[in-house]
Image: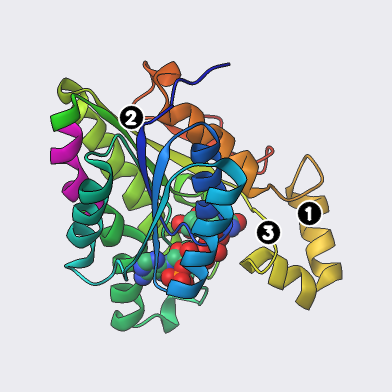
Amino acid sequence: MDLKLSDRVALVSGGSRGIGKGIARALAGEGCRVAICARTKADLDAAAREIGDATGAQVLAVPVDLTDRSAAQRLVDRALEVFGGVDILVNSVGGNRRKPFEQTTDEDWDELLQLNLLASLRLTRCVIPAMKERGGGSVIFIASIWGREAGGPNLSLYHATKSAMISAAKIMALELAPAGIRVNSVAPGSVRFPGGSWDRRVQDDPEGMAKFVRDSMPLGRFGTADEVANLVVFLASDRASLITGACIPVDGGQGKSII
Ligand SMILES: NC(=O)c1ccc[n+]([C@@H]2O[C@H](COP(=O)([O-])OP(=O)(O)OC[C@H]3O[C@@H](n4cnc5c(N)ncnc54)[C@H](OP(=O)(O)O)[C@@H]3O)[C@@H](O)[C@H]2O)c1
């Protein structure tokens, strides 16, 4: 299927490794020009080189910390300067902090609200005027199945921020439909890649994680970044022209929600 993404401009936050990097590579592979950001410049530059070499696409690396309030606008300005517009935004930046709710502090909540919610909302606000100028666009939030349904104890920080992201995306979809901007969330299940959090847990506790996979993953394995990227690339394209305000799981059946 030709997704007709050639020469579209995509911005992927958290694109130096893991799911974000997989998404940036997949969009570049479809012919997009791609801007990626992360805090660690060396990793980001290496990812941009790797993606550019593999796909032949132009990849712009912009090192920023998106929890810094001024960073989102700097990132968008740089993408506009180099590419002249933005058509696709993928908000992949985020992380997990596990601890019992009773032990969470205001600092924990401030940190995860910034990282998992406000960084992506702010970046989306900065991109909307550029998308309106192009006559439309596609915004995709990388949420989690654990923003759609309960994942278990110790996850209050993660759950609250990811479910807030999904609900904000739904309202944005309603507000931005007249401008031709579609807004969707993607909810991955447990995704393993070298050096990622699930990979570290498998190294630390191979038996426990083998049991987790047997008990929780109907397909009998973790997901991959490329499998999340395949859905994102489709949602970014005009082939998904009727899909907005959706939250779509990509989890190998791990989630238990019937909607
Ligand atoms: N892996 C999973 O199983 C899974 C499942 C469901 C949902 N998700 C979601 O998918 C997204 C990506 O997950 P992942 O596992 O690929 O994460 P990851 O391996 O931790 O990668 C996070 C990316 O974001 C960047 N980043 C982190 N903090 C940043 C900041 N303050 N400003 C700018 N960039 C920042 C990181 O680079 P630097 O550290 O250099 O900044 C890196 O490029 C997250 O939102 C996560 O919650 C993951």
Q: Disc 2 and disc 3: Cα gap in Å?
A: 29 Å
Packing grade of label 3 (10 A; few <14, some 14-19, many >=20) is some
Q: Secondary structure at mark 1?
A: helix
Residue underneath mark 3: 193
Mark 3 C-beta closer than 8 Å to ligand 1: yes
First in sequence: mark 1 vs mark 3: 3
Residue in the picture at 53% in, 17% down? 2
Q: Residue furthest right?
A: 207
Q: Find residue 229 and report its horizontal and vertical position in percent.
A: 56, 40
Residue underneath mark 1: 213
Q: Amino acid at mark 2?
A: Gly
Residue underneath mark 2: 245
Front position among marks 1 and 3: 3
Q: Disc 2 and disc 1: Cα gap in Å?
A: 30 Å
Q: Find residue 105 and report its horizontal and vertical position in percent.
A: 34, 83
Residue in the picture at 28% in, 74% down? 110
Mark 1 C-beta closer than 8 Å to ligand 1: no
Magenta region: 123-132
User: Is 198 placed left or right of 92 in the picture?
Assistant: right
Residue 107, by quadrant, is bottom left
Q: Tell me, yes or no, if residue 151 can be seen here.
A: no
> Compared with residue 159, is residue 98 higher up or lower down, i.e. above or below?
below
Residue nearest the viewer, comparing 101 with 116: 116
Q: Quadrant of the N terminus?
A: top right
Residue in the picture at 63% in, 43% down? 226
